[in-house]
Image (cartoon, rainbow, N blue to C red):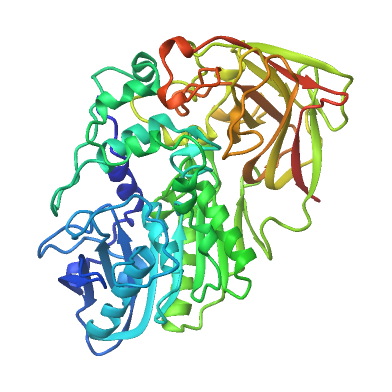
Amino acid sequence: MEIVNPVIVALALLAPAQDPFVARDHYTKQEVMIPMRDGVKLYTAIYSPKNTDATYPILLQRTPYGSGPYGPTIRNSIGPSREFAKDGFIIVYQDVRGRYMSEGAHVYCVPHRPDKRTPQDVDESSDAYDTIDWLVKNVPSNNGRVGIWGVSQPGFYASHALIDAHPALKAVSPQAPVTDRWLGDDDHRNGAFTLAQRFSFMSSFGAQRPEPTPRSAPGFRMPSGTNLYDFFLKMGPLANSHQYMKDNLYWAETFQHPNYDSYWKARGVAQWLREVKPAVLVVGGWFDAEDLYGALHTFGAIDRQSPDTERYLVMGPWSHGQWGGDSGEKLGSVEFGSKTGEYFRDLQWRFFQHYLKGSDVEPLPKVTVFNTGANRWRTLEAWPPKEAAYQALYFCPDSTMRFTAPPAAANSYESDPANPVPYMDPIGSSVNRTFMVADQRFAEKRKDVLTFTSGLLDKPLTVAGTVVADLWVSTTGTDSDWIVKVIDVFPDDAEGAMAGYQMLVRSEVMRGRYRESFELPEPFVPEKPTHMSFPMQDILHTFLPGHQLMVQVQSSWFPLIDRNPQKFVNIYTARAEDFQKTTQRIFQGGTTASRIDLPVLPE
């Protein structure tokens, strides 16, 4: 069975719902090659309303995933959602340099160049500027106002357009924007490599493209009847992956930079989001397994570094890109009680209407966030909410959790890289986008997973903001991963599939060697109690009365995350003999009290 091409999945998720409105009846299409300042020309498809009696704003998407269909064929649906085409916008799609039909060489997440002295000093900020400049000067019937939107990699390009923005750029919506591929987006989580997702994506995205082409490169084809867990376990150490990635543009680059060095830091977008002039609508999904980090940290960076920017945040109960065309009523077995996708698309339409057409629509709240658990939208003045106060929930030796620390004790488990904990059950031939809310009862049964559970809640507990894992641990090895999962346990008498369901609410991995520094990893001293604290990214979730709050701790999460040999070696070049069993210990109470810190909202 073939691994699903994530580009195709993303495009399918982002495609607006079908509507009787047919774009070709109302729009004309023009294909042009827009010159950049260094002479490279970028393929651009321009869809203009046939009615030329009015002027229209331009809405642009810059993408590495193809702006097709190429040639005279007009897309069935254009724009972020069907409302835009029906209402009248000039919709523009552009292949970024080095991708599909554009000239030039592609660089994955181009580093920003703040000091541009010659026409050859180009980046995605300058390409966006030059594109907008050409469009407003050459496209008939435009009103001089431009907006940009994009999800995932196109979100990365939307964020870069904010840097030294063209004066005509008035509104930008980076949605699930790739922001830092080492700290938390796509490739890594705190330095741990997201093996299964990257293997599938890179096999196609990193393929050589010697000349412009309207077709994507084929991805790796998994042997028929093989699931991800078995395939990657049989593959062995990461070094064995190169046989499948020959001539890949980006696979080897990743392996050459195991730590958070200048290669990764230069590709971080948030550092440049200062003095932002356009209005910004940042969008993300609470259950986005790829770029949740990007949405939260893009908004946070603008909020801190550019306080005069008109900025908005929308976070909904979605997987990656689900808000683009899905109703958003459920994810996996978890239902949200309303059409959250449609609710968002109305907010998106209002945002661009206001800033590109000057329409007298109701302004957006600064923060619009969906409260999972309670299944309702909330509007706030800030994110995280200022009224949230941290409470420590301590792990206890009897596998319970309490708001008071227990006497000193410890629990232990054996971690075996030859038998890693699966990230979900069952595992198929591609990463299941529902795993971020998946039932965790399968993991509770394993001896290499420690489980701590609160008592039954007698009143709602609403957690809003960054959950922090604060652990005291030891290992008999010299390196280890630590995965912490926050879980909402439904009562046994809940309806249908949710009876006894252990809903994953938030999860995170910390590669232990980076506990003190992402730049300078260091080994564990075997069996020495060691403190480590790390953020688990934000949530807005209400644990309802009759539910329980559960935390699971484990040292593998396979094959979502690559296996740690549990020996302090370069994991990208590790050999099979480097992988070893270890005994992992979690300390409780006294001066080594492990806990999670919850930002709790008052009821």
Estimate the x, y position of residue 31 in percent, counting from the top left: 15, 69
Rendering quarter of residue 448:
top right
Residue 340 visible (yes or no): yes
Estimate the x, y position of residue 113 in percent, counting from the top left: 41, 63
For residue 148, side relative to residue 99 (left or right): right
Residue 345 visible (yes or no): no
Pick whichever, 50 or 219, lies toward us: 219
Residue shown at 60% from the left, 27% from the top: 501
Outermost residue to the front: 117
Q: Is residue 228 above or below residue 292?
A: above
Q: Is residue 400 above or below residue 514?
A: above
Outermost residue to the bottom: 53
Residue shown at 56% from the left, 37% from the top: 190
Residue shown at 33% from the left, 66% from the top: 122
Total number of numbered discs in the rendering: 0
Rendering quarter of residue 444:
top right
Estimate the x, y position of residue 581 in percent, counting from the top left: 56, 9
Q: Is residue 217 above or below residue 294?
A: above
Estimate the x, y position of residue 209 in percent, counting from the top left: 18, 47
Q: Quadrant of the N terminus?
A: top left
Outermost residue to the left: 72
Q: Is residue 248 above or below residue 161?
A: above
For residue 147, side relative to residue 496 (left or right): left
Residue shown at 30% from the left, 70% from the top: 85
